[in-house]
Amino acid sequence: MLSIIIPAYNEEKCIKKAYDAINSLLIENSIEGEFIFVDDGSQDETYRVISELASEKENIVGLHFSRNFGKESAISAGLSAVSGDCAVVIDCDLQHPPEKIIEMYHLWEAGYEIVEGIKRERGDEKKMHGIGAKLFYSVISRVAGFDMANSSDFKLLDRKVIDVLNKMPERGFFRAISFWVGYKKAVVEYDVAERVDGESKWSTRGLVKYAFSNITSYSTAPMQIVTVLGMVMLVISVIFGVWALIDKIIGRALEGMTTVIIITIFIGSIIMISLGIIGYYIARIFEEIKGRPKYIISSTTKSKRK
């Protein structure tokens, strides 16, 4: 059986459209499937729509979070609820083409354990978002040690991969974790489609925060900035020290307070940046050691099998 995991946040208009589009493909290709809708604490009627759909259909599970925990947590909850032999994660807005699910499924039947959906075109996306995304994936690919160019959450996972991910307690970046675990991989390319309804829930600020959070989750590279800045300050200090010594020997004083003020401000800035980076990692450690759950499910709904 193929499980379809669909995270949703304020997507009341997309739920039925997503179900109809994907379910019709499964029926056409004689694939038994179940749908796991995860309502990430929506403020609209998303969960009501999911519940109504579950009462009408035979293959739906609905999970409702007590508040908004984020897409990563929603995917994690969906993976925990999977009962199929493999699962596909797909966006509710259908920007991930549903027809690619069938292609992924056939590759899984051929023996591949992870089938990655790789973006060929990013669709109608803001230019700055596109540039930012390329920069982010370039950085995280370098620091994480594997190529994540154009990757997305759209992918198929074998049961054994799902079981491994469910055992991992960390709050990780789903796209990177699925690369990190290894296994036999295949790639399916797709073009990002237009949303079937509504608008994106991501803001520029949210994307920047998301990017930095995930980079620090998979690398200590930002910590090395502290070391680099320290080395830069050492070199500058040596240069100014030699300069001051030479001026002292030849009887010429180092000029004015301007130099002292500039150096003091520069050193202060370096220290504050370094403390900020270190503090961010300490905050992430603090979040992990508290051991709080990744999400809280306030209610569930499930189709009654006829």
Image (tube, grey):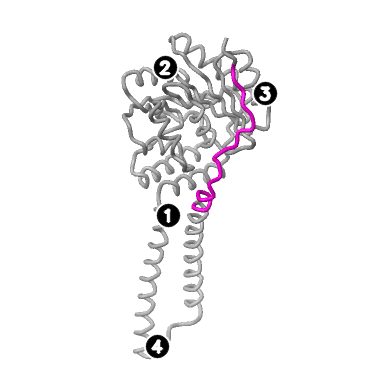
Which element is circle 2 on? Answer: helix
Residue at position x 37%, y 88% in the image: 248
Task: Give the residue number, with chain letter if any, for mark 2.
Answer: 102
Mark 1 in CB contact with mark 2 (< 8 angstroms)? no
- Say whether marks 4 and 2 touch (CB < 8 Å): no
Residue 42: in magenta span: no
Give me the C-alpha separation between circle 4 and circle 2. 80 Å
Position of residue 250 measured from the top left corner of the image (x, y, whole percent): 34, 89
Residue position marked by numbered label 4 in the rendering: 252
> Looking at the rendered structure, which numbered label has been put on residue 119?
none
Q: Residue at x 45, y 28 (%)?
A: 154
Please tell me which of labels 4 and 2 falls first in the chain.
2
Look at the numbered disc 4 and give the secondary structure of its residue: loop
Magenta highlight range: 285-303
The type of residue carrying mark 3 is: Arg
Label 3: which residue?
48
> Counting residues from the N terminus, which is met first, the one under dot 1 or under dot 4?
1
Relative horizontal placement of residue 74, taking residue 121 as reference (left or right): right
Mark 1 and mark 2: Cα distance apart in space: 40 Å
Foreground: 69 or 238? 69
Quarter of the picture holding the C terminus: top right
Q: Amino acid at mark 1?
A: Pro
Of labels 1 and 3, earlier in sequence is: 3
Tag 2: residue type?
Ile
